[in-house]
Image (spheres, coloured by chain):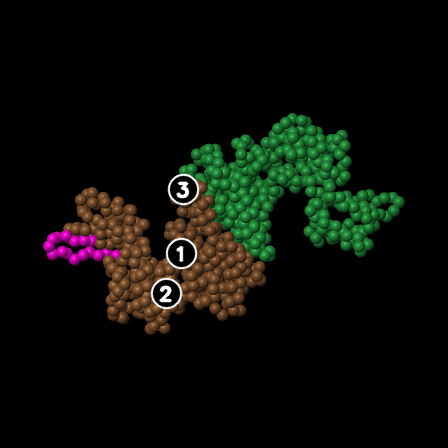
Chain colours: A brown, B green
Amino acid sequence: MALYVKKFGGSSVATTERMKNIASRILREKHDNDKIVIVVSAMGDSTDDLLALAGQVPSLRHGREMDMLLSTGEQVSISLLAMTFKSLGAPAISLTGMQAGVFCSGTHGKALIDDIKPERVFSELEKGNIVIVAGFQGVLPNGDVATLGRGGSDATAVALAGAMHADVCEIFTDVDGVYSADPRYCPHAVKMQEITNIEMLELARLGAGIMQPRSVELGMHYHIPIHVRSTFTDDEGTIIQEECVMERKRQIIKGVAQDTHTARISVLNVKNVPGVAHMVFEALADEHIDVDMIVQSVQRSNDDLTDIIFTITDTDLEDARRVLGELQSQEKLTTIIYDDNMAKVSIVGAGMLGTPGVAARMFGALGRVGVNILIVSTSEISVSCLINRDDVAKAIQAIHKEFWGNKTA
Amino acid sequence: MALYVKKFGGSSVATTERMKNIASRILREKHDNDKIVIVVSAMGDSTDDLLALAGQVPSLRHGREMDMLLSTGEQVSISLLAMTFKSLGAPAISLTGMQAGVFCSGTHGKALIDDIKPERVFSELEKGNIVIVAGFQGVLPNGDVATLGRGGSDATAVALAGAMHADVCEIFTDVDGVYSADPRYCPHAVKMQEITNIEMLELARLGAGIMQPRSVELGMHYHIPIHVRSTFTDDEGTIIQEECVMERKRQIIKGVAQDTHTARISVLNVKNVPGVAHMVFEALADEHIDVDMIVQSVQRSNDDLTDIIFTITDTDLEDARRVLGELQSQEKLTTIIYDDNMAKVSIVGAGMLGTPGVAARMFGALGRVGVNILIVSTSEISVSCLINRDDVAKAIQAIHKEFWGNKTA
């Protein structure tokens, strides 16, 4: 007997036909005494349809009411999926976030899960039901429904699995696992059998889109393994968990990530006195612009001037131009160069902690294919290089070949 | 200052444009300190859309899950209506049936309201909000959502108004009030200013479709006046309340109702011994066939035989034929005549209690226009006549002329 929490996204439940496919698969794979909890998102484009309805009302900040509206999307999919199971002869029951005991707090539209009290889920499982829970939603202390924002359904599934001490939380998705690199850039990318949640978190932070960092953090908090796998095939996917001893021995670097939405700003010839860098970064912070990589060049011997170079997300570039332009017009800064055609490639792996020369191998691989490294930054388990965006595919392929050879998936 | 509960049906909130019209009207009519609670149904055809989705799943009895599905319809309309009020600058908040404290019990799909605990509604009104409540739904003791079945949104509104001691419950509808007769049959029908809830209940029971009996009963239980009025005009409608002294003096008969879905069954030449009528009606009751009017003819002097004649709803006629046909084949009954082209016309008025000759005036009016009366039944405040369905318009017009003259609305 095992307790499984399985999460299916909107495209997996877009039609009643697809729901039937999911339900049939789950029943086929289920052992007699297995207990199954299913977390689902809203059907396909239904959230967009609800947003379009709301868009007909002159726009205001509709936090609470928008959540009241959007949360119906999951309520529709859970009830239809429960009907589907019942039509296949399997007892099933749907529960809203509130009924499943998903307690949250914070802002409407991006509430955070505070606590899970899954008494009702347990009691329905005891009765022999497959329990279908609405993802993406929870209840606030005042009894109002709130939505959990981006990655909210994954978060529901992982937190529920954690609170219920499930054997595993399975995230069913369009891709069949976590790859060593983005297959769009790197045809030789290999699917990982497992990865530590620390590594997955670092990959997510550095641009690997498959899981939101919040779900990986919840998995760490609750010590629950997350199995990322395909809705459309029966293949094993990738397991995200605390320890992957087997893998660590084999592979120092777990994955390559890229962020192609990077812009570089070079503030040149600033006086090398205390407070100048602070002035620049405070002005950006006031406008909620996050700064990522930062380099301040060593002082040039022949004058008292230095350069500050940093990266931001390219969608913030317009705002940054305005903020820094103001400082320029006040003659607090002189020359600024903006470059929005940058990308960041990173390698991630807990194994590099005890292995010297990993960064050097990465730089060497890039150098051999003529990719210029503009900025480097490192963490304990990652190395990131800023490069020209046009070089991304070449860079990823070179790095991947260096650490994985050319073996195929 | 007054507390109003206003209920709007699905066609009144079918589009965001109509919601804007409703909201504008409510704000225009609202005095500064008025407190407003609005109960709404699902938008236009949205319930049918949800039913169509459920219809794609092989059919089973989906009580609980169907309620989970259908209750989203009202949740969409309340949130959009709250947004609409806010976009017009008026603070507003939406509440589900559960949040509004609508506690119910019984069967999914046709739950009954047990109790209203409107604490949250009061506290939101105190904060200055217009409170928008989902009709047609409540919460069961186990926390599950249940729908209230036919007339459920009206029931929500009336019960809420009663529990909150509102000044009035306004039911906004496609028609502008309760008429003395159905205007489709009787062009001279007049709109009533007021009617007692006992009379309204009798009219509803006898076929006047404007209000479900359950809402009228709730109004009686809670001693709350119900104002039936038009969504589309500002005219006063009809007030349903406990006492209508002014009206009673003027008008003995309040209204004429018709039921055009009546079928007559004549069981002829049955032995006039105890137990025969019981056998017939028990067989019908076993199939959930309601019997309405019943006549057993006086015993004929020359033999020991009698006739039993009764009416049922014509949609039950097929089932009745089967049940009675079986008794025939067992030779327990001999001759049975079925006639599905019948109608029942009724007059209702509390005033007839102390006024002799009312029934006679009705029979006279029908006789003068050549309408044959087949069965008569009476209650304390009504007289009903079974007639041929083709005579309905002629009958209603004649009765109306008898009691109202030919004055126009």
Q: Are marks 1 and 2 on the same chain?
A: yes
Location of mark 2 (residue): A189
CA–CA distance between discs 3 and 1?
Answer: 25 Å
Location of mark 1 (residue): A151
- Is B399 left, or right, of A246 in this rendering? right
Q: Chain of mark 2?
A: A
Asked if B361 appears above or below A13 in the picture, the reply is above
Q: Residue furthest left?
A: A302
What is the magenta range? A293-308
Q: Residue at the location (19% across, 48% down)?
A: A335
Q: Residue at the location (76% across, 37% down)?
A: B373
Spot occupied by residue A120 in the image (x, y as percentages of width and height): 49, 60
- The image's mark for residue A59 is 3
Q: Nearer the viewer, residue A154 or B191?
A: A154
CA–CA distance between discs 3 and 2?
Answer: 45 Å
The reply to whether the magenta stretch includes residue A295 is yes
Amino acid at dot 1: Gly
Helix, strand or loop status at disc 3: loop
Determine whether label 1 and label 2 are within 8 Å by CB.
no
Q: How many labels sit on residues?
A: 3
Amino acid at dot 3: Ser
Q: Residue at the location (15% across, 51% down)?
A: A271
Q: Residue at the location (53% across, 32% down)?
A: B233
Labels 3 and 2: the sequence-earlier one: 3
- Is A260 left, or right, of B137 in this rendering? left
